[in-house]
Amino acid sequence: MSRKPQTPELVGLARLLEGRKLFLLDMDGTLYLGDTLFPFAAGFLQAIRDSGASYLFLTNNSSKGTDAYVEKLTRLGIPASPGDFFTSTDAACSHLRTHYRGRRIYALGTESFKAQLRREGFPVTDRVEEDVDCLLMGYDTELTYQKLIDASVLLGRGVEYLATNPDWVCPTAFGYVPDCGSIAQALEHATGRLPRFLGKPEPEIALLAMEKAGVKPGETVLVGDRIYTDILCGKRAGAATILVFSGETTPEVCRQSATQPDFAVENAGYIQKAMEYARNRGN
Ligand SMILES: [Mg+2]
C-alpha cells in the first residue's frame, strides 16, 4: 500500500505520543482564543478519545467555578462535564486537605471560589478572625480594597500564605487585566511576603491531576501555549510537553527560552494529524 511520505516531525511526534494515556490540556490559546473555538479543537479531542486515552482540561484560572467552564465549552460546541476539569482551585483543595485539615482559612477570592472551598468542607471565612492561620488567595475578579487590608493584617500576623496561580495577567477581549500574581505583587510591596503558588508552573497541579486520572507522569502529555506556565509545569511534573503556537508564544520566543518543550507545533490540529498517522501505521 502506498502512503504519503511523512515529515520527520510528524513521525517523531507520533512516537512521543505512544503509550500516553492522559492529555492535560490548557484551554485558552490551545483549544480556543477568548470566545472563538479553534476549528480543529473538536476533532483533536475526538482523536484523543479514539486513541483510548483521556483528557483533563487544566486551568490556572481560579476566578470561575468548573460550572462556568462547562457552560463555556458547551456553548462553544465542546460538550463537557465537571469531571473533565482540573483547576488551580482543585489543586488548592488537595493541598489543604493534606496540610491544613481543620485549620481556619481566610479565602481571598470570588464568591464561586469560596463556595467551592466550602463545598469541599473547608472552614473558610472572609473576615479577619482570631483563629485564622492560613490565607489562600485566588484570582479575585471581585477584589475590594478591604480584602487587601484584611490580607495585610493577616500576613503581618505571620499566617501561612498560599495562592492558586502566579499569572501576572489574564487576557480579555480588550487586552490584559491583573491576575493573581499581580495582586500578590501588590501585597508583597505592602507586607514583604510572597505566597506559595499551587497552579502552573508548579508541578503540583499536574501531579494531582494525574493522581485523579490514575496515571503516571510517563503516561502523560501536557499541551499548552505558554512556556513559562504550561510547558514548565509539564516538565517539572515529568510529563511529555507539546507547545502550540496558536496562543501567546511565538516561535521566536520559544527559540530564546531556557525551557524547551519536547515538541513545538503550529496548533493542536497537528497533534491530531500525528495521532491519525500513528493509528493508520498500526492498521
Ligand atoms: Mg493558555
Image (spheres, rainbow, N blue to C red):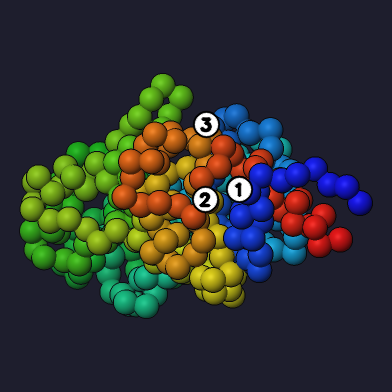
Q: Position of residue 264 (x, y in %)?
A: 51, 45
How busy is the neighbourhood of tag 2: few (under 14 within 10 Å), some, or many (20 plus)?
Answer: some
Q: Amino acid at mark 1?
A: Glu
Q: Residue furthest top?
A: 174
Q: Is residue 104 above or below residue 249?
A: below
Mark drawn on residue 263:
2
- Can residue 178 be seen at all in this image of the molecule? yes
Q: Nearer the viewer, mark 1 or mark 3?
A: 1
Quadrant of residue 281 in the image?
Answer: bottom right
How busy is the neighbourhood of tag 1: few (under 14 within 10 Å), some, or many (20 plus)?
Answer: some
Question: Which of the image's four quarters has the C terminus?
Answer: bottom right
| Element type at mark 2 | strand
Report the side of 105 relative to 37 (left or right).
left
Mark drawn on residue 9:
1
Quadrant of residue 167 in the image?
Answer: top left
* In-front residue for pair 86/118: 86
- Can residue 140 be seen at all in this image of the molecule? no
Q: Earlier in the sequence, mark 2 or mark 1?
A: 1
Q: Earlier in the sequence, mark 2 or mark 3?
A: 3
- Which residue is identified by label 3? 34
